[in-house]
Image: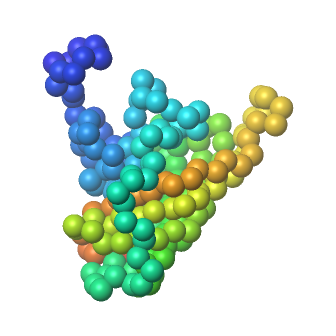
Amino acid sequence: GKGKGKGKGRMDVSKCTACHADIKPADRFCSGCGMPIQRRPDVADDGKGMNPAKFKPSGGAAPPPSEPAPSTGGIPGTYEYHKPGSGGEKSKKTMTLTAGGKVSFKEEGETSMETYVVTGDGTWTLKEGSVEIHFPRLVKKNKMKRQMIVNMGSEHVTENDGLSIPAASLQSAPASGGSRQLHKWLRL
């Protein structure tokens, strides 16, 4: 039901904070835009808005390929993703995926409290209709708009983070330009 209890009963479907697509309780990544699902505060959190259990590599995971995947399926290219300023947070993500399986990522954003830039390099693979991206290290540099606590705002490092993006959303990504499209990956 729609009760607020923490039992194992049926849970309501919620919405992605980036693109507003429906997400199910078991989803780790949005099926619309591929962004990691940010759970509510009742989920374990490391204080930086990330659930550390969500990005631990599994013991049986194969290491990233050292050679390019046999088929890149029209994925390589540079993409951007605009999230408008609804709810006080806005950002622009830019990522470049190479035919050799490398990816570089940058997100520039702003909330009511801070401005920030997240950067990182990693690897990507095409697996079962999904582009799986792994970042050994992402660095977030932020600057607080109002200094409330001495030394607040600086640099934060997240290890072993990642994205899972439906391959079709990149393969059919419209060209950026003209009217700015929001909540979807656009090809630059």
Q: Where is residue 188 in the image (x, y as percent from the top left)?
A: 44, 77
Determine whether, in the image, residue 146 is placed left or right of residue 186: right
Q: Position of residue 152 (x, y in %)?
A: 76, 36
The number of numbered badges drawn on the structure is 0
Which quadrant is home to the N terminus?
top left
Q: Which colour scheme is used?
A: rainbow
Residue lying at 46% horizontally and 71% vertically, measured from the top left: 123
Residue lying at 59% horizontally and 42% vertically, measured from the top left: 111
Residue lying at 39% horizontally and 81% vertically, measured from the top left: 76
Q: Where is residue 156 in the image (x, y as percent from the top left)?
A: 67, 47
On screen, 173 above or below 5?
below
Determine whether, in the image, residue 177 is placed left or right of residue 16: right
Q: Position of residue 5 (x, y in %)?
A: 28, 13
Q: Nearer the viewer, residue 83 or 136?
A: 136
On screen, 169 above or below 75?
above
Residue lying at 21% horizontally and 22% vertically, measured from the top left: 8
